[in-house]
Image (tube, rainbow, N blue to C red):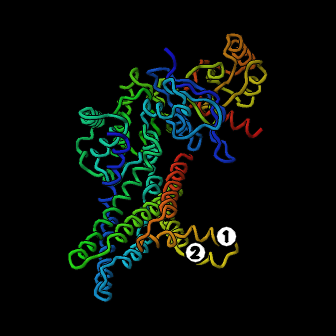
Amino acid sequence: MTAFLVLLLKEEKALFSSPIAYAVMTVFLLLMGYSFTLTLFLSHQPSLVHIFFQMFVLFMLTVPLITMRLLAEERKLRTIEVLLTSPVTELDIVLAKFVASMSLIVILLMLSGSYAVVLAIYGDPDWGPIYSGYLGLLLLGAALVGVGLLASALTANQMIAALVSLSLFLLLWIIDSFGYLLPSPFDALAVNLSLSVHFKSFAVGSVYLSDVGFFLSVTLLTLFLSVRALARR
Amino acid sequence: MSPVVVVWQLTKWYGPRRAVADVSFAVEPGEIIGLLGPNGSGKSTIFRILTGYLAPSSGTVEVAGFDVVRDAFAVRREVGYVPEDAPLYEHMRVVEFLRFMAQIKGLRGRAIGRAVDAAAARLDLDRVMNLTAGKLSRGFRQRVSIAQALLTEPKVLILDEPTSGLDPHQVIAVRDLIRSLAGHQSVLLASHVLSEIEKIASRVMILLDGTLLTADARATTSTDVRLRARISGSESEVRTSLAAISGVREVSVEQVAAAERHYLIDAEPSDRVRAEITRTLVARGLELTELVEVRADLEQRFLDLTRRRSGKAAA
């Protein structure tokens, strides 16, 4: 087993032995289940578009809870000193924490897949927007986990890490509204930084390379900066 | 045999504050080196640089032939490190933590179990193997931390305050363990407890304000030899008489008995000075009942060196 796999296993155990993972899953499923049922009974449409937008918001609210402890806790307990004086790289540590957090995101998405199954049993849904919606949520989740991980790499205080990532998510969610008030070229910049602008097309069934590129770029950039933050000692 | 640790002109700045200033020393294979200094003197910073955790601001550091900056990964394989206050994962059971550490240190298959069992037996951890780290006493936390450092039998073992928080029995056990490593592994041990260092280390280095005052505090220099004299008579007369002798640097009263005082004379260690002291005191009618040479112990050396350094700083 490589150092990365050993670290990943440790992270998975830490994540799933803490109550946070189960609290996030419970809140997520309760809210989404209620919303799905209500939307379905009211609209009678075999579609998950509304659910995808609600999951988009819920991800922004719950990802900070998953990521806040990742590196901040290691710094606070000084276990980071134990790790970084062992033959493992900063990249191994950051990737293990990222992949472990993504596993919870994937579990949430898989559990919400039951809604698509219900639609398939009782109706004839258009599968294109469903596939693209899930792809968009997966990419969004990766970008949010990346930003949360970076916030956690910069402080030893979990609350600060959570607040910084939550603030950033909210800013990136509504930044396009400010964009319309700004002069050129800042208006385009603000709109292009918006998470909701890039996610919208996935939710309604369109996959643009620019949107995929945006989420992948945010993910890779934040992972790179997290490694740099860890290496800066 | 070439040194296993070579530190050359090491300096470390934390922003505008210099934590380590131009430190140089070498550690031979099998040596147990004690790094003695008050809190904040730079011991932990030097250790963190030796383990590759911190990068030096200037100077070079080699461990087992590898440069800590260029070959940090290789250095980490050769070093076992016990940080101060024994940081552990609170949610992990001791056995899980040791297995995890064995795996990230590169052990695979049955070697993991063998290394964990051996380290647990060595540190007497069998009773606590299934407890989570959060439930361990400070003494056991320290022992678990030492056990993880020993898992791969590293060439260099670095222990930052390894006996802090241990009860006297545990201190003795850890001390015996460290002594048993002499000859097999090089050990660098930091402490601000002088008696502990004195009992374990084969060589003692003294650090103050980031500066290495001596790389071998036990090595005797001319200033370490003093004369102890028992003299009856007025103290001022004794002081005046001794001060007039060339080669006498300082006179202090060590002990006051009924009719006589015990003086400690910091003087050039030569027969001429001793003869001159005897002659002068007798000529003045002062009664000299004892004049012996005493060599400074580690405590005295530490006090002398740190006092001299503080004096220089004040000047």
Q: Is residue B4 above or below residue A22?
A: above
Q: Residue furthest bottom?
A: A42
Counting from the top left corner in percent of width and height, residue B193 is at 49, 38
Q: Quadrant of residue A65?
A: bottom left
> Measuring 66% from the left and 48% from the top, which residue is drawn there?
B15
Q: Is residue B81 above or below residue B248?
A: below
Give me the chain letter of mark 2. A
Classify the position of the N terminus of chain A by image quarter: top left
Q: Quadrant of residue A125?
A: bottom left
**Label 1 neighbour load within 10 Å: few <14, some 14-19, many 20+:** some
Q: Secondary structure at mark 2?
A: helix
Q: B284 and B297: which one is in front?
A: B297
Counting from the top left corner in percent of width and height, residue B56 is at 60, 37
> Between disc 2 and disc 1, whose residue precedes?
2
> Measuring 34% from the left and 76% from the top, which residue is drawn there?
A48
Residue A176: mark in rendering: 2
Q: Is residue A119 above or below residue B15?
A: below
Residue type at mark 2: give it: Asp
Q: Secondary structure at mark 1?
A: helix
Counting from the top left corner in percent of width and height, residue A110 is at 29, 65
The answer, for residue B217, to whether it is visible in the render is no
Q: Quadrant of residue A14?
A: bottom left
> Measuring 42% from the left and 26% from the top, which residue is drawn there?
B155
Residue B188: mark in rendering: none
B143 vs B275, left or right, is: left
Q: Are labels 2 and 1 on one chain?
A: yes
**Label 2 neighbour load within 10 Å: few <14, some 14-19, many 20+:** many
A226 vs A1, left or right, is: right
Residue that label 1 marks: A186
Q: B298 and B19: which one is in front?
A: B19
Residue type at mark 1: give it: Phe
